[in-house]
Each structure stands twice: as C-alpha cells, then as structure tokens.
Amino acid sequence: MRALDRVRELAESLSRHPLRTFLTMLSVGWGTFVLVVLLGAGTGLQNHVEWMFRDDATNSVWIYEGETSLPFAGTPVGRPVRLRNADHEMVRDTVDVDRLTARFYFRGRSATAAYAGRSAGFGVRSVHPDHRYLENTQMTAGRFINALDLNKRRKVAVIGQEVSKYLFRGADPLGEWIDVAGVPMRVVGVFEDSGGEGEERQIYLPITTAQAAFGGYDHIDQLMFTLTDANIDSSKAITAQVTAALAGRHGFDPADKQALRIRDNIEGYQRIQQLFTLLDSFVWLVGVGTVTVGIVGVGNIMLVAVRERTAEIGLRKALGATPGSIVSSVVQEAVLMTAVSGYSGIVAGVVLLEAVRAWMPENDYVRDPQVTLLPAAVAAVLLVLFGGVAGFIPASRAARIQPVDALRDA
Amino acid sequence: MIRLRELRKSYRVGDRPLPVLKGLDLSIETGELVAIMGSSGSGKSTLLNVLGILDAYDEGTYHLDDVLIRDLSETDAARYRNRFVGFVFQSFHLLPFKDAAENVALPLYYAGVSYRERTARAHELLERVGLLDWADHLPTQLSGGQKQRVAIARALATRPRVVLADEPTGALDSTTSGEIMDLLLDVSASEGTTMVIVTHEPDVAARTGRTIRIVDGRIA
C-alpha cells in the first residue's frame, strides 16, 4: 500500500514537467545506449579476430626453415637451414612443450589423389599424431594418424571432408585405398576443420611413411608445438631456448632472425587480447563518461526541482512530512529517472545489436556484436547507485528547507 | 490544551541576540477559540510558529495537551505537527497540481493512512465545509473562499488537538471573510477543536471567545 502510494507520488511529480523529465532521461538513456553499442561493437571486433584465429591453436609456436643472414663461424650468409627428424626429437626430449609435431611437404605441398577413376590435386601434409591439436582437426569418422602408423610406416591417409566428397561421392571411404602421388594409401579417417573448405581439402599422412615413400629422408619442413603455460613470457623463453638449441645444431648465429622463421601465435594472440582489453577500458571510459554526464544532468534537474518546490516542501513538512520522507522521495525520483532511462538505453542498445546480428551480412570487421550479461548487470547496478548519488545533494538541500521560511507569505 | 510559561525566544541579528518573545505566559483551554492580535514585529508570528512546532524556543516551557514540546528532533517535530496541529494559512498553500480531495488528504498520507481511507475522510471533510461537489477540482478552479475552505478541511484531516490559523481571512473580501469565520466558529463549536487565530482585523477578533494582545513580546 505504501509502496503504491510512493509510486503514485513519484509518477505525479515526474509528470509535472514532462518535457524536462523526458530530456533529462534522454541524456541518461543516450549514455547507456552508447555504452552498450560501443561494448557490442568492441565484442564484435574481438569475435571477428578470434574467429580468424579459430583454425589454429592459439597457444602454438610454428618454426619454419630459413636462410642465414648473419655470418657465423666462418660460414657465409644465405646458407639454407634444413630441419631434420633429429631436431624434432631434440625438442621432444629437451623442451617442455605440450603438443609437438613436424610437417614434411613434398612437391610443392600438394599431390594428385585418385580413387576409382576420379583424381584431383589436394594439399598433402605429413605429420605427427599431435598435429590434430595444432590445427584443431575434428574427426568425423575413423581416427587420426597414431604412433603405430609412424613406427610401422603404415601407408594410411586421413582425408578432409572435401576430399572425401570429391573422391567417394558419399560412399564410405574408410578402409578404401586411394592413390596419393602414385603411392596407394588406405583411408583410416575423415575430418572437418573450422578453418573451412581449404583446410578440408587436405590429406594427412604419417610423416615417416611420407619421408620414406617420397624421398624425404629425414627432412622436415616445419616444427610446430603448443605450450601448457601459454603466456607471452614463457612462450618467448621457450622459443628462445629452441632457437638457441637449433642454432647450436645447425651452426648459425642465435641472433640471426632469418635462419629460422618463427610464428608465435601466443604472442600474436595475446597482443591482440591486450589490445582488446585496452579497447574495452576505453569503451567503458567513454560510455561511463557519457552516462555520468546524463546523471549529473539528473542531479542538476533535481536541484532545480527542489528549488522550485521550496514552498511545496515547506508545506509538506508543516503537514507532517519528516526530513527522511522528503529525502527519500527526492532520491527515489532521481533513482527512478536514471534507472528507467538507463534501462531503456540498455534495452535499445541490445535491440540494435540484435538487429545488426540478425541482418548484418558476414564481413571482414565485425562478427556477432553483443553485450554479455555481466557488463549489462554492472551497468544496471551502477545506474541505481549513481541515481542515488545524483539525488542525494538535492535531497539533503530539500531536507534543510524550513517550513517557517518556505511558507512566509510574501 | 496550550500552556506557555515564561516563554523566551530571540533571533540572532549579526552577533547580538534580538529578543522577540520576552517571557510570555499563556493558557488556552480545550475547545477555546482565541484571537491573537498585535502589531507587526510584536512577536505574534513567532509565537504562532512556536505553537505550531515549526520553530524552537530558547527558555520556558510549552505544553501541548500536557505534552512538553521541547528540543524535538526534526522528525519528531514533524510527527507531532502531523498529529497535534492543523494549519490554515493566509495564502492557503494548497498544492496546485493536486485536486481538492488530494490536498485535504495530504496530512493523512504522512500519517500513514491508506489511500482508500484517506480519500474517504477527505470527501467527508469536504462535505463538512460544503465543497463535496468540488472534490476533483484543482485549486486554480476554486475561488479564494473555496480555497480557504479546502485548507480548513485539510487542517482538520488528522483530527488535531489545535488548529492554528494565520490571518485566515487576510486574502479575502469581507463577505467571504464572514463566511470563513462562520465555518471556523461552527467547526470549533461542533467538533470542540481548540483554535488560535492570528489576525489584525478587529471584526474577526470580535467573533472569537477571547482576544489576546501581544505587545513587544509579552501578553498585554
């Protein structure tokens, strides 16, 4: 009953100056709207970047062969560095890595694969079993390459969905023999890859089999590994450790940036993460700034309202209004204004984001813009709090009004 | 009903006190209707503020219905005003955005009376002052006399011990003044409400039971 009374009184005093109330609320609502839209856009950008990283493990380091660019121990520059199986074993045995694989390519990384009279060129990668974790390879049928395949140099192949579609046209490929660059290989697994069709046009072979079958001897083209503790410092330290060991084995200057090409996904990913943290703080700064301007506006309007209502407040006190009830009605008015307008702004922002999500074509900048529950909840709580703060100064001024002074007949 | 003993109050003007009430003794019995007269600056407004618990006093005692009114917090003062005192002002002081019934019901809102109950009571009081048909009219739609009738109804809303009227006819023509005085006398007689009317009009004072004259902060 009392609550209903309060609402009635509040609605009445807010509706006394509809335009002023509306404009004041608009400024708060606009603030939260901007905050939500900015947060959503930031999340959209971040989602897009994370989507670009979706294919590969984000805690991985890739090492490619290169050429020396610094003279070392009497050797000339421009000398190619060739990675060997022994390098893979060295990393496996001496470095604290989580997943480790090498890659061996042959003949320009692709080969003709044929089955039942159909043939086409596909990418071929010869790898270790851990490779599936580095490329986020998802098996849809059968299995990936395993240790036994490597030990026994089995002629087995794991093919991408697109390969399977083309060569088998819907038939079950498991157990079938396909021809890869003239060597028959038995299909033991089919995979899909979030990297898209290009990744699903790949064929994986056991690295030992490929090296033997295609004249690779003990050559590897690439070393890839992930770290258990994926932060920039540890990834840098381990990369440096690996580089130094390889420099020792291959006789090049450890400071030579060209001898090996290193792609540190951890560093790249975390730098981008940091960038987004920065962007996020910036968005909060701008958004909270805008909301604050609106809330200061509410406080201001309440001050004006209290001044206008001096006589009214004096009369109410004479009729028995306690200072507490005056304070709470002013604070409630401010909270109501900020809360209602703030929530409206949040809702409008979310509606806009959802509309964009639903109708925006796929593009290269933004993906799935949205606000998560937490920032929305934080904003909601802050609004009520700030509304209270905005109402407090005018309210305490109202509480100090003396009925004697306010009612003095002019 | 009202007992004042040696009441003193001074205002501070600059750094020296300016005494306004200088040891005032006054008793008003229950159901009495008294007029207070005095020239401007005599202290009659200050006296009315003290009686209405709108202002504090420095020395002496003020008993209202045998309750000592002294050193109250603002909150307690507000509660006592609500329960014990009804006010009628020269310029009515109705809230312009509330209709007559809502204005009458306002003290009951602060007394914690439910909406339904206070609306019923407001209509009852408006009937008492002859304005039932005007219950949903805003003050701007009422004449001066009607506004003061609404204000009187409001002053009676919480059934206070005492009604304090500050120049209740000051803004009205003589015919209307007469009608308002008729109403106050009628209420006083029928409800037994104690009334204190501050006025400078001898006609008004003459219709009360007793006239108290204040001269220079004392009862003359």
Image: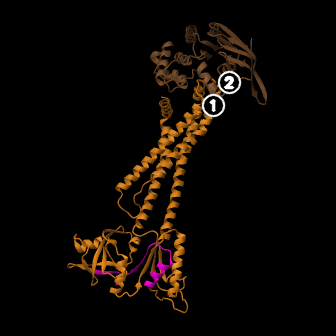
Chain colours: A orange, B brown
- What residue lies at 50% left-to-right and 27% top-to-bottom? B97
Q: Residue at x 45, y 84 (%)?
A: A86
Q: Position of residue A323 (x, y in %)?
A: 61, 31
**Residue B55: mark:** 2
Q: Chain of mark 1?
A: A
Identify the subunit bearing mark 2. B
**Residue B72 placement (x, y as % from top left):** 67, 26
The answer to if A109 sits in the magenta stretch is yes
Up/down of A97 relative to B42, above or below: below
Q: Is residue A260 left or right of residue A303?
A: left
A386, above or below A129, in the image = above
In the depicted structure, whether residue A208 falls above or below residue B138? below
Whether discs 2 and 1 lie on one chain: the answer is no
In the image, which residues are magenta?
A83-112
Q: Quadrant of residue A73?
A: bottom right
The answer to whether any part of residue A400 appears in the image is yes
Residue B111 at x, y percent in the picture:
55, 24
Give how far apart the Cα atoms at labels 2 and 1 are: 12 Å
Q: Secondary structure at mark 2?
A: loop
Q: Secondary structure at mark 1?
A: loop
Q: Determine which residue is flagged by label 1.
A: A401
Q: Nearer the viewer, residue A71 or B102?
A: A71
* Residue A81 spot, x, y in % from top left: 46, 86
Residue at (60% x, 24% y) in the render: B79
Q: Residues within 10 Å of mark 2 (few under 14, many from 20)?
A: some
As drawn, the residue found furthest toward the bottom would be A74
Is A80 on the left-hand or right-hand side of A301? Answer: left
Q: Are marks 2 and 1 in contact (CB under 8 Å)?
A: no
**Amino acid residing under circle 1:** Ile
Q: Amino acid at mark 2?
A: Asp
